[in-house]
Image (cartoon, rainbow, N blue to C red):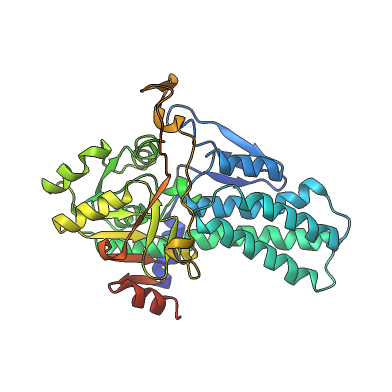
Amino acid sequence: MEKLVEELKRKFRPKIKPIEWKGDKLVLLDQRFLPFETRYFEARTVADVAEAIRNMVVRGAPAIGITAAFGMVLSLVEKKPRTVEEALNTLTSAKETLAKTRPTAVNLFWALERMYNKATEIATSTATVDELKSALEEEAKRIFEEELDAEIRIGLYGAELLENGDTVLTICNAGGLATGTGLGTATAPIYVSMMLGKQVSVVAPETRPWQQGARLTVYELIQNGVPTKLIADTAVGLVMLKRLVNIVMVGADRILLDGHVYNKIGTLNEAVLAHEFGIPFYVLAPTSTIDPKSRVEDVEIEERDPDEVRTARSNQGIVYVTLKEVPVYNPVFDVTPPKYITGIITEKGVATQPLYKNLRKLLNM
């Protein structure tokens, strides 16, 4: 596999670059305006990075993790600490600020912890502030490169499950926009299959209320030449009943060791329907998305502004589609119990049922 991974890395030329590090700033493709406008958000401070994560300039668990890693580097660029001790205090403050932005996606906390641990490791030597900053910059770049490597491997494992002519159902956006690399997790098998000569198409639900399927998944798949059909979220059951899809592939924001999967709201609906209709349902994510410590009762499911449900987005702006005062319940994620999941595909392989045993084997735990 190693030779093929390197070959695919050389072949892969994404048309979309969601995250670019410029040395003193982080340039993010502003996903709030896609597909109607291409705007970029320049983050020069920790507050900028926190705003970008909180307000959905950047979204998707791996992309949030990468952005947060560079946010830690930016804290040193911004504050210009004079001593290593001051630098560690600056990083502690940045870590606390960024950790408060989104509570559910585990990659955020994983990346922040990794960056801070790297800093404390460097600080134990005779490193200067400049050496510390350089080491953290390299660590953030390494997180990005490791993510791309993981996605190619996920793509290869997933491509083994796809036949020429298959149609994949997904949800939300677990493509390159969500991971920062241009490849993605749930979309990786599609792109890899195409690079290997297979023809694969996609059915993408709109994914209310932020319409990441309609605005983002459709946009990036069509940009990359993948035949794609958009459906209403409420059409998923009929699509499965009529056998218009062969397999379901979704991403994840957090995976527990017992196999519970947290992902965009609506994932549970797809999983239950797929189970009922006998359609394979796979979750695709790097092992950095696996949370080895939490239980279901420990995980906070983020709720967002009620107006996200009361309104719809278009190229004319945001318009109300209901009464402005109607009460709203707006959870961003749901949790899919393991019994509805055929398998979890990671860069280390595929964990099949029973997930509570095979995820541990995959992680050598």
Q: In screen coordinates, is 344 left or right of 316?
A: left
Q: Is residue 54 above or below residue 359?
A: above
Is residue 7 shown to the viewer in this render?
no
The image quadrant of residue 195 is: bottom left
Q: In screen coordinates, is 334 left or right of 271?
A: right
Residue at the (23%, 59%) spot, across then down:
162
- Please state which of residues 309 and 278 is positioned toward the viewer in this rendering: 309
Residue at the (42%, 70%) spot, across then down:
257
Q: Is residue 11 above or below residue 208?
A: below
Residue sticking out furthest to the top:
316
Q: In screen coordinates, is 338 left or right of 5?
A: left
Q: Position of residue 238 (x, y in %)?
A: 15, 42
Q: Position of residue 65 (x, y in %)?
A: 56, 55
Is residue 357 shown to the viewer in this render?
yes
Residue at the (67%, 61%) spot, across then down:
138
- Please state which of residues 357 and 153 is positioned toward the viewer in this rendering: 357
Residue at the (46%, 48%) spot, across then down:
178
The image quadrant where one finds the N terminus is: bottom left
- Please state which of residues 302 and 65 is positioned toward the viewer in this rendering: 302
- Please state which of residues 341 and 17 is positioned toward the viewer in this rendering: 341
The image quadrant of residue 54 is: top right
Q: Position of residue 24 (x, y in %)?
A: 72, 45
Q: Position of residue 40 (x, y in %)?
A: 57, 34
Residue sticking out furthest to the left:
242
Number of numbered discs visible in the structure rendering: 0
